[in-house]
Image: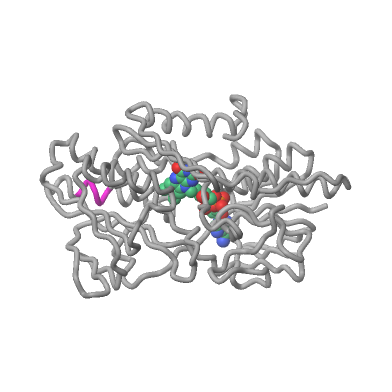
Amino acid sequence: MKILVLGGGFAGVEATIKLRKYGYNVTLISDRDYMFIYPVSIWIPVGKRSFEDTKLNLFDLQKKHGFNLVIEKITKIDIENQQIVTNKTIHEYDYLFIGLGMSKVYIKGMEHTHSICGKPRESITIKNELEKLVTKGSGSINVGFGGNPKDPTSTTVRGGPAFELLFNISHYLNKKGLRDKFKLTFFAPMAEPGKRMGRKAYKNMDSFFEHYHVNTHFGKKIKEFTKNAITFIDNTQLDSDLTLFISGGDGMNLIKNTSLPQNETGFVKINELCRVENKDNVYVIGDAAAIINHPWAAKQGHIAEVMADVSTYNFHNTIIASGKRKSYWEKLHIICVMDSGDGAAFVMRTAKKEIMIPLPIVGHWLKKGWGWYYKQSKMKRMFRIPGM
Ligand SMILES: Cc1cc2nc3c(=O)[nH]c(=O)nc-3n(C[C@H](O)[C@H](O)[C@H](O)COP(=O)(O)OP(=O)(O)OC[C@H]3O[C@@H](n4cnc5c(N)ncnc54)[C@H](O)[C@@H]3O)c2cc1C
């Protein structure tokens, strides 16, 4: 039985490890030889974490868990012929787990912006651009995020890291004694950015903006980015020496070009078992999957891990002809520690509950601790805490 897992991110890595635990021979295909631990990459631009430290080497992981590892770029997913085409060869499969993440909506002039949610190395570019401005001694920095107009539920909006980067930059400039020399602005086209974290959390954002002396600019559609400005739909502009923008999530062309059932944004439609509708041998997990029936939910790393757990459990029980099944819908929730450099806020949202607890410096250390724990537990250097 040939099992392929596509994508060495949160979803693919966890699915591969779980499949090995069930005793299957499995091959992971990814285009990078490392997993990038995105949640802690927010500290790379402000020099609190190195790029190397934010990587988890897939060859080291392979040695610990005993899977086959192929570092190749996937160019075609051929569902009809059960083949994965890469830049080097063709891989056949009997069962497929897709965890390839997502792409971003393009807005005119976006090449003049940098994203902390883009290719991993972009975090280093942001660090270098920030350092240039610090050397200059003053400037205007704009940090924002957008949505996908085709996604009415906005499950593809990634706002948390924009807030984290913004507050960390404010704290960083403050420590350098330069805070009053910089204008920091948060911008977003939606009228109530951050509402996905829940009403309580959204209401509390004002106190964060005030505390970190951040101007706000909400509710106007972005027309275009240029080298030194952001232009909005009414032709008003924000001057900008550095624009950091997280665009709305979009399905990847690689997936849009397949016959897999998709929603209007190009994410794969799965059932609550994480299995593709009408394709019993294909599971889609993590950011690449469409979260349906739960419009309040968000795509997050820990949801990618939940999906990896649920899909592999259901796969295994199907193979051994057991009737046991798990649903990822039952485990959906938004949970994050939103870091601000000198503090944090714990945010939790479920279908019924909304919680936001300000955590002073302890929250900052908690998130730093999670980054360490994540690596150690994946490398089997410490036991896994259930649910983390
Ligand atoms: C800055 C930032 C901060 C975040 N903070 C949090 C947080 O605090 N908490 C939280 O829960 N979530 C957080 N998230 C969200 C979380 O990181 C994502 O939800 C998670 O990475 C999704 O996992 P994934 O495996 O689906 O996709 P990814 O992690 O994007 O992995 C996709 C994998 O597929 C590979 N790949 C892509 N295309 C190809 C190809 N053509 N061929 C071969 N391989 C390919 C990539 O190299 C990558 O290894 C954050 C995200 C960012 C960007």
Main secondary structure type of the part rendered in magenta:
helix
- Of 144 and 97, the residue lying toward us: 144
- Range shown magenta: 128-132
Queried whether the magenta region covers residue 1, the answer comes back as: no
Quadrant of the rendering where the C terminus is positioned = top right
Residue 37: in sight, yes or no?
Answer: no
Q: Quadrant of residue 95?
A: bottom right
Q: Quadrant of residue 114?
A: bottom left
Q: Position of residue 270 (x, y in %)?
A: 67, 60
Image vertical order of residue 67 relative to residue 264, above or below: above
Queried whether the magenta region covers residue 130, the answer comes back as: yes
- Of 84 and 218, the residue lying toward us: 218
* Residue that protrudes farthest toward the front in the picture: 352
Residue at point 27%, 46% (across, down): 206
Q: Position of residue 217 (x, y in %)?
A: 24, 59
Q: Does residue 91 appear to the left or right of 169 in the view shown?
A: right
Q: Does residue 354 appear to the left or right of 322 in the view shown?
A: left
Image vertical order of residue 196 relative to residue 86, above or below: above
Residue at point 19%, 71% (across, down): 236
Q: Position of residue 171 (x, y in %)?
A: 24, 38
